[in-house]
Amino acid sequence: MKKNKTWVRSKEQILICGYCEVCGKQLMSDKGNWIVNAEKKKFCHNGKDELCFNQYINNRKNNDRLSQNKVR
Ligand SMILES: [Zn+2]
């Protein structure tokens, strides 16, 4: 059996603020390793590189390029 509740012993209430748009990871209120973009979408962030956020931007660029090609 897999146990997901590893933060049971904590005194402070830890909330799940949302899920990463790219990898689907839970983003907890006690950890600052995620960001919200202008579209109110949330992404993993390790404080140095924007990780999943960068991936999302890159994917979007690729999709834009593809859809532009389709139009022609
Ligand atoms: Zn992520």
Image (cartoon, grey):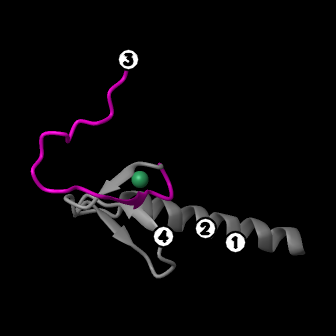
Task: Find the magenta span and give its range.
Answer: 2-23
On the image, which quarter does residue 50 sit in?
bottom left
How many marks are shown on the rendered structure?
4
Mark 3–mark 2 contact, CB under 8 Å? no
Mark 3–mark 4 contact, CB under 8 Å? no
Residue located farthest toward the right when viewing the structure as drawn? 72
Q: Quadrant of the C terminus?
A: bottom right
* 9 relative to 2, above or below: below
Q: Secondary structure at mark 1?
A: helix
Residue 64 drawn in magenta: no
Classify 10 Å Cα crowding around label 3: few (below 14), some (14-19), many (20 and above): few
Residue in the picture at 41% in, 60% down = 18
Which of pointers 3 and 4 lies earlier in the amino acid sequence? 3
Mark 2–mark 1 contact, CB under 8 Å? yes
Alpha carbon distance from label 3 to label 1: 43 Å
The three-letter code of the residue at mark 3 reads Met
Residue 4 rendering spot, x and y as whole percentages: 33, 34
The three-letter code of the residue at mark 2 reads Arg
Alpha carbon distance from label 3 to label 2: 38 Å
Residue 69 rendering spot, x and y as whole percentages: 82, 69
Which of discs 3 and 2 lies nearer the camera? The answer is: 3
| Residue designated by label 4 | 41
| Residue designated by label 1 | 64
Q: Secondary structure at mark 4?
A: loop
Residue 33 rendering spot, x and y as whole percentages: 25, 60
Which of pointers 3 and 2 lies earlier in the amino acid sequence? 3
Which of discs 4 and 2 lies nearer the camera? The answer is: 4
Q: Secondary structure at mark 3?
A: loop
| Residue designated by label 3 | 1
